Amino acid sequence: MSRERVLELLEGVAAGSMTAEHALQKLAWLPTEDVKGNGDVSDRSAIGTEGETPFARLDHHRALRVGFPEVVFSAGKTTAQVVQICRRLHATEGGFLATRASVETMDALEREFAEVQVNRTARTAFIPFLPHEAPSLGTVLVLCAGTSDLPVAEEAAVTTQALGGTAERVYDVGVAGIHRLLDQSAALHTADVIIVAAGMEGALPSVVGGLVAAPVIAVPTSVGYGASFGGIAALLGMLNSCASGLTVVNIDNGFGAACAAIRILRTRRPA
């Protein structure tokens, strides 16, 4: 959004021809930034040349609308594209979150940003959008059934942290050894939201959903033997859960589960 357009909105509010709420709505929907580049990760220019087709259009005011900024899905993008997008988000939003990043991309982001937090299990890299002293939105407990589910669970935990929540982790508590889960009753009953990642038959979210009052978000993972069909068996098991009110996201979508948790947390406190 141009300075002239912002000035026009402010003058309208000052003159009484526009309400402050209407101006805020305009600010929330209009501004975007085109990101161009020549594919060279060492080129610090994100503007590109006149007439060049943008490879990304950043939505700088998404946080005003939905409560958290735009996130970079790195799969399918070149390392240079991800780095340039993260440069612009860092400059304008104060931070960024890149998910599903390749080893090359994570290495490049570590070289570019001294303060970046890279999680190679989750395939993420982030700098917090909010200042360190900002209060947490609440606690999200991330559970996973087995160690093989860790990449999905860690994606959920990192996303929670990047978007302003506190992530607590309890891993390898699947139903094959249900006593391991029951031993975590204190963590289960103090969490504001619980994310449960599980593969195989996807039974763990149903068990958790029958134990706690907090919202439970289930994440089927693509972990399992032949009849698991790459996570479809776990997905169908969770969708057919007898634990009422269970929310289910797509296979391996730890990011989506965390975003749902953040939306829930934001309804619990004033904007």
Image (cartoon, rainbow, N blue to C red):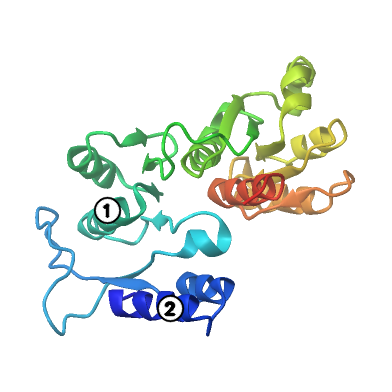
Q: Secondary structure at mark 1?
A: helix
Judging depth in this view, the residue of 145 and 189 nearest the camera is 189
Judging depth in this view, the residue of 141 and 232 nearest the camera is 141
Relative side of 228 to 63, left or right: right
Q: Secondary structure at mark 2?
A: helix
On the image, numbered disc 1 is attached to which residue?
91
Q: Amino acid at mark 2?
A: Leu
Residue visible at 85% across and 36% down in the picture: 213
Q: Residues within 10 Å of mark 2 (few under 14, many from 20)?
A: many
Relative side of 41 to 254, left or right: left
Q: CA distance from mark 2 to mark 1?
A: 24 Å
Residue visible at 52% across and 41% down in the picture: 164
- Residue 195 % position (x, y): 67, 39
- Residue 74 % position (x, y): 36, 55
From the viewer's perspective, is residue 77 above or below residue 133?
below
On the image, numbered disc 2 is attached to which residue?
9
Relative side of 165 to 59, left or right: right
Q: Amino acid at mark 1?
A: Ala
From the viewer's perspective, is residue 28 above or below residue 195?
below
Residue visible at 52% across and 70% down in the picture: 24
Query: Which mark is in front, 2 or 1?
Result: 2
From the viewer's perspective, is residue 227 above or below residue 20?
above
Mark 2 / mark 1, whichever is N-terminal: 2
- Residue 241 % position (x, y): 84, 47
Judging depth in this view, the residue of 248 and 66 nearest the camera is 66
